[in-house]
Amino acid sequence: MSPIPRYAGLALLMGSLPLSPASSQDLPRPRPLPLAHEFEVDVTYREDMPTPQEVIGHRIGTRHTRPDQLVDYFQALARASDRVIVRQHATSHEGRPLVHAIVTSPANQARLEDLDRKSVG
């Protein structure tokens, strides 16, 4: 009896694979989710608040938004509203600001330190 070549099993497996593209590539593309303003909800927005498109140049979700553009947008919101404060809490290893936004009523904005102390302990 002659020995079976070492890669005969692999050759059999490769020969049984279909030559057509994977079936998942043939599936229809999922319908994109609607952007927030496209949902049918009864929401009103303040006309004096800047939109992301006005500040960064495109609608959120239509293309990549860089981190610096998000910082610019949050800072624009803070300039336009007494309900928004933007604070830098760190700096990235590349020297970029890492920020967070606090959105609350003007009354709560005035007592943030007190609220922070109460939440910590």
Image (spheres, rainbow, N blue to C red):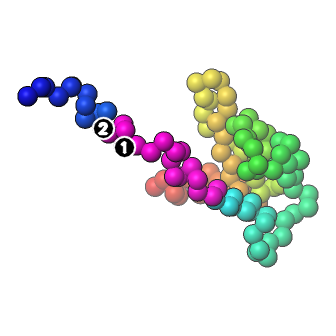
Amino acid type indicated by mark 1: Ser
Which x, y percent locates residue 77? Answer: 81, 50
Task: Please tell me which residue is depicted at 73% across the width and 41% down the height of the picture.
Answer: 65
Above or below 62: residue 96: above
Which x, y percent locates residue 99? Answer: 66, 40
Q: Is residue 23 left or right of residue 53?
A: left
Q: Which residue is tagged 1?
A: 16
Above or below 72: residue 109: below
- Determine if residue 78 is in view: no
Is 4 in front, or is 86?
4
Instruction: Specify the quadrant that holds the N terminus.
Output: top left
Task: Please tell me which residue is depicted at 53% across the width and 58% down the height of the picture.
Answer: 118
Secondary element at image label 1: helix
Above or below 97: residue 43: below
The reply to whether discs 1 and 2 touch (Cβ–Cβ < 8 Å) is yes
Q: Which residue is tagged 2?
A: 12
Is 71 in front, or is 83?
71
Q: Which residues are magenta?
A: 13-29
Q: Is residue 85 left or right of residue 45?
A: left
